[in-house]
Image: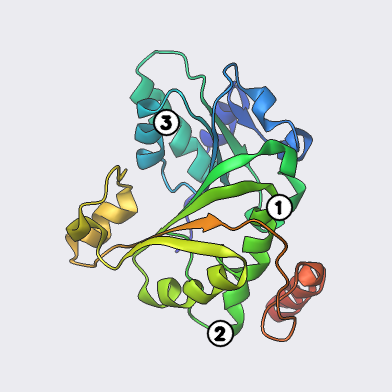
């Protein structure tokens, strides 16, 4: 479903002190964007930012970078952050507009990201060849490995069973250790769990939320080039994507 353009989003983001439309210039220097020296967490895709705002407000000791590709989404996120802080200065979050599939151009090992959140990303289940566009696909996970510290974690939530099941071997192949898994997050009573508008919607419909937590193993990872898409093939894949759309 196409999202209606929110004309107010770009102007509001343009004057927001914790928004950047030039994420590539921060590569290797994300920690310098914050007043405090604390853990750096990254959220990939944020929806309307309801859960993001609550998480950021509740954890002032943690620095967050929230990334999405559209100003519509980030505009909502900014408003929800402002609402959560209720006039207090916002110091522990940066919101960045960028295409996550190119995240290797935005984060470097020097950024030392300690946790990544992937919540309710597009499952890309309509056609098998679209799987390579998933935020959990090996071509993405290998990029995350580059800037995630050893032992750093990826927290993954989804309502989509196919995406969840098919992502398990992705993480294994890319050198991530499974530390926790549940096929019904709410029944398991996992805390903390910041609930997004998407999660509320599907929970109300009786759809169980799947959740898994992975940790990056140390050492070099070699992917099977026959089974998985290697990082060096990104450009060719994107050219193929463009050809498909023509």
Whichever of labels 2 and 3 marks the residue nearer the N terminus, that label is: 3
- Asked if labels 1 and 2 touch by Cβ distance under 8 angstroms, the answer is no
Going 66% across and 55% down the picture, which residue do you hit?
145
Q: Is residue 87 left or right of residue 104?
A: left
Going 69% across and 57% down the picture, which residue do you hit?
143
- Taking 143 as reference, is 57 above or below it? above
- Considering depth in this image, is 158 or 239 the residue closer to the camera? 158
Cα–Cα span, label 2 and label 1: 27 Å
| Residue that numbered label 2 is attached to | 128
- Taking 55 as reference, is 157 above or below it? below
- Considering depth in this image, is 24 or 140 the residue closer to the camera? 140
Report which quarter residue 216 is drawn in: bottom right
Q: Quadrant of the N terminus?
A: bottom left
- Considering depth in this image, is 141 or 245 the residue closer to the camera? 141
Residue 207, given in percent of the width and then of the height, sits at 23, 67
Cα–Cα span, label 2 and label 3: 36 Å
Residue 179, given in percent of the width and then of the height, sits at 42, 59
| Residue that numbered label 3 is attached to | 56
What label does residue 146 carry, if any?
1
Determine if residue 58 is in view.
Answer: yes
Q: Quadrant of the C terminus?
A: bottom right
């Amino acid at each position: 479903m196409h999202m209606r353009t929110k004309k107010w989003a770009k102007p509001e983001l343009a004057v927001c002190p914790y928004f950047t439309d030039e994420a590539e210039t921060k590569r290797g220097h994300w920690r310098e964007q914050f007043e405090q020296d604390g853990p750096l967490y990254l959220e990939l895709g944020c929806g309307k930012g309801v859960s993001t705002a609550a998480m950021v407000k509740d954890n002032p000791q943690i620095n967050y970078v929230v990334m999405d590709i559209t100003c519509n989404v980030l505009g909502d996120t900014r408003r929800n952050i402002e609402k959560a802080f209720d006039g207090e200065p916002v110091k522990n979050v940066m919101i960045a507009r960028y295409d996550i599939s190119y995240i290797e151009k935005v984060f470097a090992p020097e950024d030392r990201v300690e946790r990544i959140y992937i919540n309710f990303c597009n499952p890309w289940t309509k056609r098998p060849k679209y799987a390579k566009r998933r935020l959990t696909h090996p071509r993405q996970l290998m990029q995350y490995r580059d800037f995630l510290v050893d032992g750093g974690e990826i927290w993954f939530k989804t309502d989509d069973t196919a995406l969840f099941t098919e992502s398990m071997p992705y993480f294994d192949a890319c050198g991530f250790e499974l530390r926790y898994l549940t096929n019904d997050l709410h029944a398991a009573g996992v805390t903390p769990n910041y609930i997004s508008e998407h999660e509320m919607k599907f929970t109300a419909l009786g759809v169980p939320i799947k959740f898994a937590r992975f940790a990056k193993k140390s050492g070099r990872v070699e992917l099977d080039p026959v089974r998985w898409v290697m990082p060096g093939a990104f450009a060719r894949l994107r050219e193929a994507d463009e050809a498909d759309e023509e």
